[in-house]
Structures are given as C-alpha cells and as structure tokens.
Image (cartoon, grey):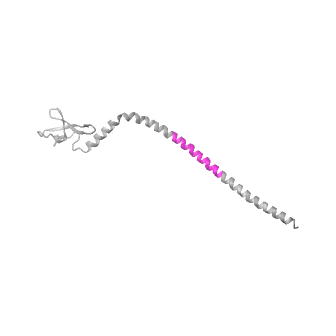
Amino acid sequence: MESKKPFIITILIAVILLAILSFFIYDLNKSNKLKEDNLRVLESNLANESIRIAQISKTKDSLLQRVNYFQHYTSLVDATFFRDSTTQSLKYKAGDIVLLKPDSSKVVIKEIIIGGTQYEHYIKYKVVLKDRSQLEITPEMLY
C-alpha cells in the first residue's frame, strides 16, 4: 500500500500540472486569435486608408494643375483685390454725380483708376463733363 501512495501523488501532481498547462495553452491560443482578429481589422483599415490617400492624391494633383494654370494671373488677382478694398473706403463710387472744385460744375464719375508702383500708389477719378469730355482728376478736386 505504501508504494501506491507516491504513485497516486505523482499522478495527481501530473494531472494538476497538465490542467495548468492546458489552461495556459488555451489562454495563449485565445489571445493569439484576438491578436489575429485585430490584425485583420487593422489590415482592412490600412487598405481603406491607402485607397483614400490615393484618391486624395489624384484630387490634389488635378487641383494643382488648375492652380498652376491660374498662377500666371496672381498679380492681376492681387491688383483687383487691392482695387476693391481701396474703393470700399472712398467717399464716391462710380456713377455718382459730384461737383468739380474749380468751377463747381456737375460731373459724373465714370470710373475709379488705381495704380502705381511697389512704393507709390495713386487714386484718380475719371469723370465725364457736360460736354461729354472726360478728365482724370484726383479725389481732392471733388466736393
């Protein structure tokens, strides 16, 4: 009888160790499956993002072609913006009837002329007199 006790204890310890080992193998397999599932999800997200980046790159390239086409007109756009921002602050607009200073005659403002260089700008009004002649005058010459 005494010889069977160590054999039973050895079998019991082996069964307990086998159960613990089985639990760890099962847990590792389960975590491995979770990691594989996460990896599949990440790979699908990466594929979707790659497609999206390719589409955005194509759009960017086509827009860049349009911008490069209009790049030649940058100075014209800047001049137009400067003209529009300057005319907003002026007292008189095109089409207004005003008095001319030297003789107080009525004139109609035909257009506003803005020009100059990098260091100097000027503003002039092109006005139409009663006899249909046109003059370019400075804003100081108007009432």
Coordinates of residue 105 in the picture (x, y in percent) = 13, 38
The one of 73 and 87 positioned closer to us in this rendering? 73
Tell me residue 30's x, y (percent). 67, 54
In the image, residue 43 lies in the stretch drawn in magenta: yes
Screen quadrant of the C terminus: top left
Most prominent secondary structure in the magenta stretch? helix
133 displayed left or right of 74: left
Nearest to the observer: residue 118 or residue 111: 118
- Residue drawn at x 35%, y 36% as measured from the top left: 74
Q: Which stretch is magenta?
A: 33-54
Residue 1 left/right relative to 109? right
Q: Quadrant of residue 65?
A: top left
User: What residue sits 32% from the left and 39% below the top?
Assistant: 78
Residue 56: within the magenta?
A: no
Name, please, the residue furthest toward the right. Answer: 1
When asked about the image quadrant of residue 88, the answer is top left
